[in-house]
Amino acid sequence: MAMSKHADSTESLRAPRRSSGSPPSEARRWPPVAESEATIRIVLAQPRGFCAGVVRAVDIVERALEKHGKPVYVRHEIVHNQHVVDALKKKGARFVEEVSEIPDGALTVFSAHGVSQSVVREAESRALPVIDATCPLVSKVHSQAKHYVAQGRALILIGHRGHPEVEGTMGQAGAEVRLVSSKEDVDRLDLARDAPVAYVTQTTLSVDDTREVIAALKGRFDDIAGPHTSDICYATQNRQSAVRELCKIADLILVVGSKNSSNSNRLREIGVEAGIPSYLIADGSELDPAWLMDKKTIGLTAGASAPEVLVLDVIETLRGIVGDVNVSRMNGIEEHVEFRLPPELRD
């Protein structure tokens, strides 16, 4: 099943920009039909899709290409979405996993996930011109980690081993970092109860995801410090809360995102935990018509690195399968967060 013309168009990779209260773009594309005429009802999560950190990272690569020409080398995928990566490749971006793969003198972009100090030093040693696209919220975690280490505290990172953000944070702290993902990991920590400790968290984990582990840490240690819950990534929490609301009304949850996207996988897991059949799909081509059997209401959302054009593609595919669909949007948080571009790319 090929992607629709909407996904093949030059429509922006960025999140749709609209003022609070204005109709969503998808409502203008597909006006809801009368409920009695529609075979299936599609309810869109609010919010969904691109967060401010992803918008900034994609903008950085596009602006760098416009200003400096191609190629621009990006260490690791700029964000975890193959559609975004492929679109940027067509414009002249080249993605590598190691700085050693970048030619001398080539413009280099660090991905939104952040990098370790060893990567920074390697780029500096080769005098590579670097633009840092690390999400400002990830950079804030790096600063918090260094602050706690400077206080003489043992640092604990709540996150998933192997995730590039975790590797970057562990390499930024300047000291040993103990990684935990569960209460059991907390029990195994080789630290005395009265040791001064601190924790930081991977930004793609929400308040809900970390609550149990943080409680275990606070129960284990007498002298513990950590960030306020307001420092948790707003986008992760908002998207998870929206899916929980969808689960109250949906027969099926579809999450648009890449398989290697941590936050997209978590959105699918939330649907499964609620007892709702839930699937992670890259675009409409991965939609299995069998999933729709006896389903009346489909909850549709997208991970923080998935562009809205892919959500539109899924809706178009559903139309092709079942005919008329009733498209509506749940009430939810309107995000107005914007992060500034690096000074060298500002107009």
Image (cartoon, rainbow, N blue to C red):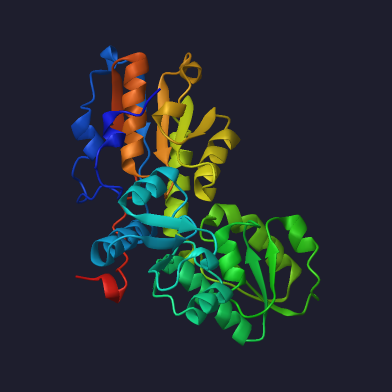
* Residue located at (20% from left, 31% from top): 29
Relative to 52, residue 307 above or below: above
Residue at position x 45%, y 56% in the image: 95
Comparing 70 with 27, the one in front is 70
Q: Position of residue 278 (x, y in %)?
A: 53, 31
User: Is residue 330 visible in the rendered structure shown here?
Assistant: no
159, 122: nearer the viewer: 122
Q: Residue farthest to the bottom?
A: 151
* Residue 60 visible from this viewpoint: yes
| Quarter in which the C terminus is drawn | bottom left
Of residues 292 and 36, which is closer to you in this image?
292
Residue 59 x %, y %: 30, 59
From this view, report whether residue 36 is shown above or below residue 238: above
Tell me where residue 165 appears, x and y as whole percent.
54, 62
Quadrant assignment, res 104: bottom left
Query: Number of callouts in the render?
Result: 0
> Where in the figure is residue 174, as x and y percent of width and height?
62, 80
Can you name the residue that lies furthest to the front here? 104
Where, quadrant-wise, is the N terminus in this rendering?
Answer: top left
Give left or right: position of 164 versus 56: right
